[in-house]
Each structure stands twice: as structure tokens, then as C-alpha cells.
Image (cartoon, rainbow, N blue to C red):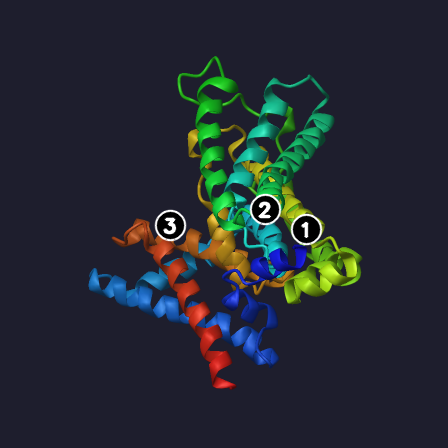
Amino acid sequence: MTVTRDREVASAPDTVLARILRGPDTRLGVVAVPVVAVLGALVVGGALMAVEGVAPLSAYGEVVLGVFGRTRGLVDTAVIATPLILLALGIAVAYRARVFTIGAEGQYIAGALAGTAWVTVGPPLPGFLLLVSGLAVAVLTGAAWAGITAWMLARFGASVVITSLLLNYVAAAGLAWAVRVGIRDPGSFTPQSRPMGAAALPDIPGTAIHLGFFLALLAVPALAAVLRRTRFGFRVEVLGANPEVLAVNEARPARTRLAVLALAGSFAGLAGFVEVAGVTERMTPAFATGYGFTAIIVALLGRLRPLGVLVAALLLAGLTVGFDEAERVFIIPSATVGVIQALIVVFFVAGEALSRRGRR
């Protein structure tokens, strides 16, 4: 029974992810497919801008200047990349184990909401303890939120994709209620929580780069070491390669899936709290920005590897910042970045399929 369920889980829509996990046969191919995907998306995006009457080269020049032409562009890139890095690291681990969750957005919201509630209406604590305990609450809540999906899978064999997707909407509804009723600032006319106060993350003086960015940077080598040098990392790789082998040797692959989902949820909860404590400093209805979905693109573009995730997060964050600047100069639709991100995924998936077919 267990082996049968493992086979069903493994046969989920994983053909593309399996190719990403295997990767090209050469080191050049590892880099070439993502680079070509990005360039292809930019070319098509440029063609769409040309149709709108915007000179693509001028627009892309403004994008580059928006990121590298001023200090604020680099700072904004780092700030936007922070939650993307943390979210995508958790997603990468789950996908390496062929656990195809798309619930990072809900876990991100749940972690941020719980951490904010603890900090703003919880027990009075000194500033440092308040910050650390808020982080812990957010991490545990993110893990628990992901644990619902794990329990549904283990108990009823429910689809991880569907369950995690639906939980995103539950979390969004919880956010809407909380900022209007549950943790609303009684002194505010708009729906929002009380400010974080002493629990706000410190930042570099004169910039918006906060401590969370450095936590995200440290998480990259830390996760890489866990995946390479620990028994848990070995189980993740075996589960991704052949869950039946893990079932034979361990007899509890479901336990590994639970751990993987909990870890992904922990990263998402951490990302949510870091975003609140480091950027917004209070919860609002606009907190659900879709970072959890963008992080899936980051994880795939980074080939589900920690270092690749870092590079991909900085790239997509830079595109967001650059296009925000270009929109001020040219009449470019605000959805341009989203279109280019979608095109990157399309070209990346197509590149993976073609690279495999070309070697047969």
C-alpha cells in the first residue's frame, strides 16, 4: 500500500522537474538553458513593447540604469530579493524531493500574520526577545500551515498541489479578517495592524537593506551544506530520485515528505516575518503580493539549487526594480514584468525539453 502510494506521488506532473533535477550533461548546459530562457523572454518582451510604440533598447537601457545607475536601485533589488530567496529555498527543497507544493504564498502570509500578532498583541517582552520570539512564532506557524498539506496527503492521499493551493486562499482570507478585526490598530482609520515597534529588524543606516537580507544570504550556504552533508539531505535526494528505494530502506518516506513540507513552510514563514519586520513594519491587506508564486519561478530558474536560487532571485528582483523605473520614463504596461517572468518559465521549460530531446 505504501509503495503504491509512493509510486503515485512520484508519477505526479514531474517530467519537467525531473529534467531540472537531472540537469544537462555539461556544465555549459546548466548555465546555457536559463540564460537563453531569460534572453528569449527579453526579446519577446521587447517585441511587445515595440508594438506599443516603445523603443525596446531604450526601455531596457532604462531598466539597467534603474538598477545599476543609482544606489537606491541596488538597495531596492536586495530588499525585494530577500523574501524571494527564502521562499525559493524552501520550494527548492520540496521540489527536489518531488513534493510539488504551491502553498508558499499561504505559508508566507500565515507566518507573517502569526509573528505580527505575537509582537503587537502578545506578551510584553524586551526588544530583542520580542524580535527573536516573533521570528520563532512565524517559522513554526509556516511549518504548521504546510503541515496541514502533509497531513492531508498522509491521511487521505489528497493532492499536495490542490491542497496547498486552496490553503493560499484560506490564508489570504485570514489576513483580510485579521487586519480589519483581529489585530487591527484601534487608532487607525485604515485596516492595518499596530506597528512592529521594537521588534522591527535593524537596517544599514541610510539604506533600506535590513538584517533579513543577510539572514537570506546565510541561509543559502547553510541549506547547501544540509543537502550535501546530512542524512536528511540524502533522504531528500533519494526521495526525489526513487521513492520506492526510500520505502524499502526506511519504510517511512511519508515522514521525509512531512519534514520537507515543514522545512519549506518554515522558510516561507520566516520570509513573511522578515518582510513585515524589515519593510512594511505592520500588516495590511496589501501584504499578499504574490511573492510565493514568483518564488516558484525563482526556484525553477535556479535549478532547485541554493546558489542558483540566489542568482535567480537577484535577477528577478532587479527586473522588477528596473521596470518600475522604466515605467516612469516610458509608457509601459505595469504587467510587463509579469509577462516577462511567465515567458522566462515557458522558454526555460521548452529549453529543458529540447535539450533532452536533442541528446536522444
**Residue occupied by mark 1:** 254
What amino acid does circle 3 point to?
Answer: Asp
Circle 3 — which element?
A: helix
The image position of residue 191, as x and y in percent, is 42, 22
Most foreground residue, 200 or 355: 355
Question: Relative to 301, does residue 172 appear above or below in the rendering?
Answer: above
Q: Nearer the viewer, mark 2 or mark 3?
A: 2
Question: Relative to 108, does residue 120 appear above or below in the rendering?
Answer: above
**Residue located at (60% from left, 48% from top):** 86
Mark earlier in primary sequence (2, 3): 2
Give the Cα distance between marks 3 and 1: 44 Å
Question: Relative to 101, does residue 241 appear above or below in the rendering?
Answer: below
> Callout 2 environment at 10 Å: few (<14), some (14 to 19), or many (20+)?
some
Q: Are marks 1 and 2 in contact (CB under 8 Å)?
A: yes
**Residue occupied by mark 2:** 153
The image position of residue 15, as x and y in percent, is 51, 68
> Callout 1 environment at 10 Å: few (<14), some (14 to 19), or many (20+)?
many
Mark earlier in primary sequence (3, 1): 1
What amino acid does circle 1 point to?
Answer: Ala
Instruction: Kindly tell me whether residue 244 is visible in this rendering.
Output: yes
